[in-house]
Image (spheres, rainbow, N blue to C red):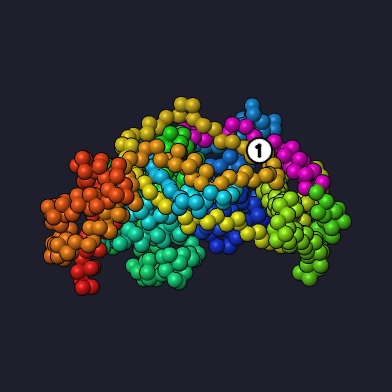
Amino acid sequence: MRKQAATHGKRFAVIADEAHSSQTGDAASKLKQVLTADELAALTDGGEISTEDVLAAQMAARAGESGITYVAFTATPKAKTLELFGRRPDPAQPASATNLPQPFHVYSMRQAIEEGFILDVLRNYTNYKLAFRLATAAGDLDDTQVERTAATKRLMNWVRLHPYNIAQKVQIVVEHYRETVAPLLEGRAKAMVVVSSRVEAVRWQIAINKYIQQQNYPLRTLVAFSGEVHDPESGPEPFRETSRELNPDLRGRDIREAFKGAECQILLVANKLQTGFDQPLLCGMYIDKRLDGIQAVQTLSRLNRCHPGKQDTYVLDFVNEPEDVLAAFRTYYATAALSDVTDPELILSLRTKLDALGHYDDNEIERVVKVVVDPKSKQAQLDAAIVPVADRLLKKFAAAKASQAEAVARNDDKAAQAAKDAMEALLVFRSDLGTYLRAYSFLSQIFDYGNTDFEKRAIFFKCVVPLLKFGMEREGVDLSGITLTHHSLRNRGQRTLPLSDKDAPKLAPLTEAGSGAVQEKEKAFLHEIVEKLNSLFGSDTTEGDQLSYANTLAAKTLESKTLRMQAASNSKEQFAHSPDLKRAIEDAIIEAMDVQQDLSTRALNSKVIQEGLKAILLGPLGLYEKLRSLTESA
């Protein structure tokens, strides 16, 4: 199209519907250098980019081209989209805080809801609050120092992947779906479960299928994710979306097509199908993933499609605060607007920072650019121009890594830290190169820098970034001594989140590009981090939330031959009402008094605690199933 427009004077219009919808494959791989750090992290875990990103990158290739008009439709424009495509109230003046670019046309979310084209997905919103406590094996962690941020993330991820945590959420999801969502649309209503990672998606589906099978419910699930998942705890072989262990109902079909049919009711997703996925039968969504800003709107909007008879949708959220979700929707409820425009001086500051590091010189830049712009050049010429620069940086990183290992071996903490800082400085440098590419590809479309040095650096950086494959191991955190002792999920009630355009948050422009720097990592003892998490998340736990105590009772109850026989010859519902089970739990509480005197006393004097313990025993701890298996094996 560009060639036709430039050489033959032809004119074209590029029309993109659902410009926020997902793109994968070649489109995604070609755009890695212009994605943000968060987008790159999501892409690494099987995430997707949007058509909007593709269009912006296409336009970046020829900022000043004429003869091509872009027309894109999206309910959730990004700030860079408004800056790039938006129209200035005063076209004669540059964009500024008083001359903010605006959409060419707006058909708002509010108008679409009022006119019945989409549904308000925040009318039935239920939020759950997670509370938990962790314990450490006595003495194991007293002398263990780790990086506070990394260890906190590892611990929180450990809790998220804990089988008990997943089992509790699975039970809530399945039972809510059966009772509230499944009866809608004459029994055809479907639901989506949104989780944080591909590993979680695999473990969730295994757990949800196990629960459905145990309860003998006529439900089937599908799970959607990209790439492979290596999770030895779930299975010895890598999992793929097409694995029969996960999706036997696919039978060679695309997962979107498979989910249309009547066979499967619940779809689990991880960084896939959260945008642009159109399934009008979706009436329920269960969220176990942090959703910020635009991602919250795009994800929950999978529910807003109209369908004959569809009046209500339901959202259960285990992670996000209702106020944050509402703020995200209010940004797009009327008209998404910018708070300011990006300062073109950002690219000047970033260029100065990168040049000052001395990792390249002007001659090397010129050598690479000369090869790239020459249509007759060969790949060997480009390699000869760029590889020496990359090799020099890779050798610096390798030398620092070797120095760190030697310093650690001789217990020289100061030298080890200096070597580590040198490695992290190179990592920041590589990150800043990517930031320059993103910022320049965007800003050069709306601002004429009048200096080819900026363009030359963009060409040079684009060639060198893919070669800087620094390898830096993450600091390990040993969590083998950690135990989840208490766990609860409190239902904070169903409510309607009131949509309005009053004080709607604005879209923020690009700021502080390339501000990354090597920072001293804060160290802490692991047991101190555990205590901090317990103070943040454990205040709402009670004795009835104690897992280790329930496990103690389960172990003692499994010894009863009477209960084994009853479990073998009765349904689970009948077994739950057995007076022998009640007495066995009381006996187990008494026997456990030597270990946990205070809790046992409270349990004996509280029918509520005893009923709660029985629910744990028969639910996630699987007492009934274990008793039956013991009888069958005997």
Vertical arrangement, residue 502 with respect to residue 552, above or below: above
**Residue 215 visible to the viewer:** no
Other residues around mark 1 within 10 Å, as few (<14) / some (14–19) / many (≥20): few
Query: Is 592 on the left or on the right of 358, as rendered?
Result: left
Q: Quadrant of residue 210?
A: bottom left
* Quadrant of the frame with the C terminus: bottom left
282 on left or right of 180:
right
Q: Nearer the viewer, residue 18 or 331?
A: 331
Residue beneath the point at 40% across and 37% down: 539
Q: Point out the stretch of residues depicted in magenta.
A: 331-356
Q: Position of residue 271 (x, y in %)?
A: 48, 54
> Circle 1 sits in a helix, a strand or a loop, which is it?
loop
Give the residue at x 37% y 56%. 163
Residue reaching furthest to the front: 594
Image position of 325 (left or right of 369):
left
The x, y position of residue 289, in whole percent, is: 44, 48
Q: Quadrant of the N terminus?
A: bottom right
Question: At x 55% / y 62%, what residue is drawn?
Answer: 25
Tell me where residue 544 appears, x and y as whole percent.
29, 44
Q: Which residue is mark 1?
A: 511
Q: Is residue 107 above or below residue 400?
A: above
